[in-house]
Image (spheres, helix red, strand yellow):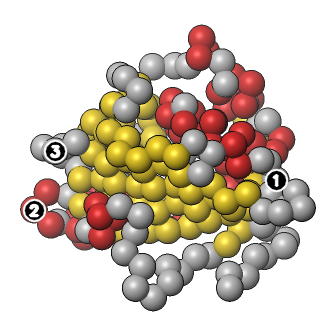
């Protein structure tokens, strides 16, 4: 049984023994997993996440996601004070509305990337557990160089911070800055308005 920290509503997740990911692409490369409880219905959090243009509003190292079709999108990732940028095309490989979403980079991309997010609504209005699994596999297997140059010093910490910003966004409508003040540009009202997306 997972222990939920009532103070932060965050869960530090260790995959159960024998778990190999929701789709096979998560079995390769550098893997990270994190989860958090968000006090919103699962379908609402799913709908927000399903609009992939919203992801850079809480995953701040994602510079942009351009949606090309219902399943295809182009991702731009930034790191090291914007001195490093990596781009790839991604395709949604599994979509269960209100429950889960899985994606992977298309064949031939500079970075092999796969991810799955699940939304598990708790009974008695106790919120939704949002769990994300990510995998990165750079070309040539240069994992150490990739982590240092692209992902940064602690990808696991970054992932947890991203989920905390998502929780703020879904529960309060704004994301706090590092000083603890709301970040108006990433407000949920703007995020849900396609006319205000910046590409």
Q: Does residue 63 appear anywhere in the picture?
A: yes
Which residue is pictured at 41% across the width and 47% down the height? 94
Q: Which residue is mark 1?
A: 39
Ranked by sequence position, the earlier of labels 1 and 2 is: 1
Which quarter of the rendered picture does the N terminus lie within?
A: bottom right
Looking at the image, is mark 3 or mark 2 earlier in the sequence? Answer: 3
- Displayed quadrant of residue 72: top left
Q: Position of residue 111 (x, y in %)?
A: 23, 50
Q: Which mark is residue 107?
A: 3
Kind of element beneath mark 2 = helix
Secondary element at tag 3: loop
Toward the viewer: 154 or 92? 92
Marks 1 and 3 sit apart, C-alpha to C-alpha, by: 37 Å
Q: Secondary structure at mark 1?
A: loop
Q: Position of residue 48 (x, y in %)?
A: 63, 36
- Judging by the rendered image, the residue that carries numbered circle 2 is 140
| Crowd rating for badge 3 (residues with CA inside 10 Å; few <14, some 14–19, many 20+) | few
Of badges 3 and 2, the one in the foreground is 3
Q: CA distance from mark 1 to mark 2?
A: 42 Å
Which residue does the image show at 27% across and 39% down from the upper left?
Answer: 88
- Which residue occupies the extreme top position in the image? 195
Residue found 24% across the figure and 61% down from its top? 137
Q: Is residue 176 above or below residue 160?
A: above
Determine whether, in the image, residue 64 is placed left or right of residue 85: right
Of tags 1 and 2, the one toward the viewer is: 1
Eyeballing the image, is 168 above or below 121?
above
Count numbered badges in the picture: 3
Outermost residue on the left side: it is 140
């Amino acid at each position: 049984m997972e222990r939920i920290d009532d103070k932060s509503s965050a869960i530090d997740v260790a995959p159960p023994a024998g778990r190999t990911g929701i789709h096979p692409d998560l079995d390769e490369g550098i893997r990270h997993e994190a989860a958090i409880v968000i006090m919103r219905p699962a379908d609402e959090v799913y709908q927000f996440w399903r609009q992939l243009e919203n992801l850079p509003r809480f995953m701040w190292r994602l510079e942009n996601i351009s949606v090309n079709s219902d399943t295809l999108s182009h991702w731009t990732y930034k790191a090291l004070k914007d001195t490093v940028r990596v781009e790839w095309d991604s395709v949604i490989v599994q979509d269960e509305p209100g429950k889960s979403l899985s994606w992977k980079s298309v064949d031939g991309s500079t970075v092999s990337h796969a991810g799955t997010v699940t939304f598990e609504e708790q009974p008695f209005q106790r919120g939704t557990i949002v769990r994300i699994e990510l995998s990165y596999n750079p070309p040539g297997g240069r994992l150490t160089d990739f982590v240092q140059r692209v992902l940064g010093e602690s990808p696991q910490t970054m992932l947890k911070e991203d989920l905390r910003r998502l929780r703020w966004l879904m529960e309060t409508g704004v994301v706090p800055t590092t000083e603890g003040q709301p970040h108006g540009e990433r407000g949920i009202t703007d995020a849900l308005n396609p006319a205000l997306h910046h590409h």
